Image (tube, coloured by chain):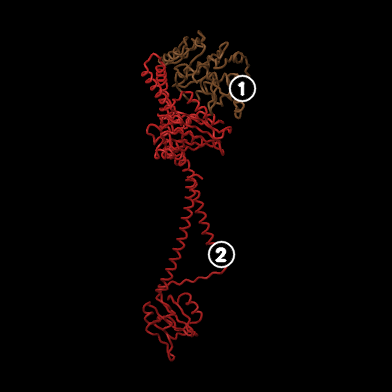
């Protein structure tokens, strides 16, 4: 994950420097920067980065234009960064084809979380295995190994687990989980969700009635705790 | 009916009232004058009957007593008494040139008109004699009036018709004039009303009142420009502050997480980061409140689930790492019943974020926060309660008054709660601030599910 090349584009030198510092500290080593739209396009063509972090407001060619140009030929993931927090900007960015959108000012945590999620989604690791307290989940093969025994996951269970894993250590609300397995019109599917969760627990937990990996946040939703993480 | 229409309606009614009053008063005045004139005439005039009463026959001779003589003298009048054959049987100061005997035709003539230029009044006595009192020429006008009964009726009806026609004509002309004034004034009044609401549409600068319209347009432009300048300024500042604040937050976080630094320095960096985050939400509040106030951002209405928005707001607080001295819980009043309503997800989320943050910021020693969402009778409700220090009665009262929340601001409860109120208002709902039992602050929000 950390060896992906990331292109950082912003017209502010100070901000570029800080972004580099944030990514370096988080373990990303291959970083390139550009301070204008033209330069960004040139570097993108020459070096084919794995992810682009793009500022919207830049003199000359702005972020939206750069994104449009890139989207003519490439599906490379792009995270838009903007000083304009307006909802219209957000919608425009996502419509053009941005993968995510983060308004300034942001916390390094928030940025890294989003970048991590995009990279996870776009470049799935081969043999992705998730270590839990009592079991190991193989996301590639959609199966769980517990006490040396293999149990397959259903498609819905896998979707659920991936959503929770993307946000490991964080509460994911019932609404978001229902939407993940039932689509936009998820209202009334809460009981279906709890059935899937119960089945998932039977497969991954040592004691499904006292879950430690897939825990309930009362009234809110669920959370996955990875092996060794503080619960 | 709007206030302008009400004003003109009242104006028309009052003018019709004035017209009616005017006519009635004039009618009364005319009657009074006529009566007064008539009364004064009889008061000062000489009564023939009275004179006649003082003229008596005694043993074949007619004599008048002192009263009769005095009356005649007072009015400079003469008198004569005719018997049934027309012969003068008594006279007092009768001019020489007048005859001493009259035919019945002559009597009929002068009793109605004049006796050789002398105006006369007559009185027919019970004994058959006729008392005639004459005055100096040109002291009394005699007018004889006669008309056939049908003509009189027509005359009366005609008079009433003329009167009614005049009245109707006056009312019509007045209504027409009022209508004209109303037509000219309405846009101006509407303009002033719009101006007071802060949404001004320029007026047509033609017609008789073009100058007023132009003046109003100038005032509108000026106000709008001022508003826009302010909104633009706030937008500009909040935009320009974003990048520097990103740097502050970024480096403060870096320092906070740097294991090589002493604990003190890392704690201080943490403080900078937390204050930076407060600054960030302040800027966002400022930006949103400006947009809502100047209606720069229309509400995006879609069907939302308030319970899910509540869950996400509470989860986000927990995911962000809530210090242990705080507890937060989320519950639904009727689990399973969807709290669906029309609303703007981002704004409703902001509303809940602000209420939760308000409880956290004002209770630095920690507190228990509970967020409850419910749906009942076509309304969605949301209650955020904490068991912290709460607010004193005057502050609660000020918050509950419809007054501008920012005016109660002393740094803390200002902008965030103002924005909460604006968001609730934009969704057509209500917000109430209470003293929680036994202590703390309770904020109850109620929004109609259909609120277009």
Chain that is brown in the image: A
Foreground residue among B317 and A22: B317
Quadrant hosting residue B250: top left
Foreground residue among B186 and B138: B186
Q: Is residue B208 above or below residue B349?
A: below
Q: Position of residue A208 (x, y in %)?
A: 58, 22
Q: Position of residue A163 (x, y in %)?
A: 56, 20
Estimate the spatial distance between the alpha carbons at disc 2 and disc 1, rounded to whole Å. 106 Å
Q: Position of residue A76 (x, y in %)?
A: 54, 13
Q: Are marks 2 and 1 on the same chain?
A: no
Please identify, in this view, whether the residue under mark 2 or under mark 1 is nearer the observer.
1
Residue at numbered disc 1 = A199
Which mark is on residue A209?
none
Residue at numbered disc 2 = B154
Which secondary structure lies at badge 2?
helix
The subunit carrying tag 1 is A
Foreground residue among B385 and A67: B385
Chain that is red in the image: B
Find out whether the residues at labels 2 and 1 contact each other: C-beta distance under 8 Å: no
Which secondary structure lies at badge 1?
helix
């Amino acid at each position: 994950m950390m060896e992906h090349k990331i292109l950082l584009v912003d017209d502010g030198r100070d901000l570029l420097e800080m972004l580099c510092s944030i990514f370096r500290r988080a373990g990303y080593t291959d970083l390139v920067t550009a301070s204008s739209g033209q330069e960004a396009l040139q570097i993108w063509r020459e070096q084919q980065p794995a992810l682009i972090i793009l500022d919207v407001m830049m003199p000359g060619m702005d972020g939206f234009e750069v994104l449009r140009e890139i989207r003519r030929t490439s599906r490379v993931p792009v995270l838009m960064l903007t000083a304009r927090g307006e909802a219209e900007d957000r919608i425009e960015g996502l419509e053009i084809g941005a993968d995510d959108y983060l308004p300034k000012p942001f916390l390094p945590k928030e940025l890294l979380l989003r970048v991590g999620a995009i990279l996870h989604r776009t470049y799935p690791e081969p043999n992705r295995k998730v270590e839990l307290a009592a079991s190991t989940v193989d996301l590639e093969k959609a199966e769980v190994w517990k006490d040396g025994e293999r149990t397959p996951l259903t498609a819905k269970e896998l979707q659920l687990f991936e959503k929770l894993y993307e946000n490991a250590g964080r509460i994911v609300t019932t609404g978001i989980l229902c939407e993940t397995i039932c689509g936009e019109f998820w209202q009334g599917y809460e009981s279906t969700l709890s059935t899937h969760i119960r089945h998932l627990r039977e497969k991954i937990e040592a004691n499904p009635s006292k879950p430690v990996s897939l825990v309930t946040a009362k009234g809110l939703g669920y959370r996955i705790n990875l092996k060794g993480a503080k619960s | 009916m709007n206030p302008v229409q009400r004003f003109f309606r009242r104006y028309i009614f009052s003018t019709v009232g004035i017209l009616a009053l005017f006519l009635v008063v004039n009618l009364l005045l005319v009657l009074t004058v006529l009566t007064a004139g008539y009364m004064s005439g009889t008061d000062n005039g000489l009564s023939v009957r009275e004179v006649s009463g003082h003229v008596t026959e005694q043993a074949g001779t007619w004599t008048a007593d002192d009263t009769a003589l005095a009356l005649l003298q007072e009015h400079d009048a003469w008198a004569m008494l005719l018997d049934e054959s027309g012969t003068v049987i008594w006279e007092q100061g009768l001019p020489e040139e007048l005859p001493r005997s009259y035919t019945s035709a002559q009597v009929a003539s002068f009793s109605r008109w004049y006796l050789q230029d002398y105006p006369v009044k007559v009185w027919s006595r019970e004994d058959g004699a006729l008392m005639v009192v004459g005055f100096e020429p040109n002291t009394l006008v005699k007018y004889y009036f006669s008309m056939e009964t049908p003509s009189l009726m027509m005359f009366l009806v005609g008079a009433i018709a003329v009167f009614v026609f005049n009245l109707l004509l006056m009312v019509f002309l007045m209504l027409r004039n009022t209508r004209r004034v109303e037509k000219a004034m309405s846009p101006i009044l509407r303009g002033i009303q719009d101006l007071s609401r802060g949404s001004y549409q320029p007026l047509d600068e033609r017609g008789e009142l073009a100058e007023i319209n132009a003046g109003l347009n100038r005032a509108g432009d000026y106000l709008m420009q001022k508003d826009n300048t302010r909104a633009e300024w706030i937008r500009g500042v909040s935009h320009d502050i974003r990048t520097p604040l990103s740097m502050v937050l970024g480096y403060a976080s870096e320092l906070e997480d740097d294991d090589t630094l002493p604990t003190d320095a890392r704690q201080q960096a943490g403080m900078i980061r937390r204050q930076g985050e407060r600054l960030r939400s302040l800027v966002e509040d400022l930006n949103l409140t400006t947009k809502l106030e100047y209606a720069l951002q229309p509400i995006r209405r879609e069907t939302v689930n308030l319970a899910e928005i509540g869950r996400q707001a509470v989860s986000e607080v927990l995911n962000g790492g809530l210090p242990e001295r705080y507890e937060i819980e989320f519950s639904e009043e009727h689990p399973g019943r969807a709290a669906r309503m029309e609303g703007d997800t981002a704004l409703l989320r902001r509303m809940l974020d602000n209420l939760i943050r308000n409880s956290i910021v004002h209770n630095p020693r920690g507190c228990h926060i509970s967020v409850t969402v419910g749906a009942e009778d076509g309304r969605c409700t949301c209650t955020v309660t904490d068991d912290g220090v709460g607010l004193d009665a005057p502050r609660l009262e000020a918050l509950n008054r419809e007054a501008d929340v920012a005016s109660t601001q002393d740094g803390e409860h200002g902008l965030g709660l103002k924005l909460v109120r604006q968001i609730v208002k934009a969704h057509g709902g209500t917000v109430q601030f209470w003293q929680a039992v036994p202590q703390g602050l309770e904020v109850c929000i109620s929004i109609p599910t259909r609120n277009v």
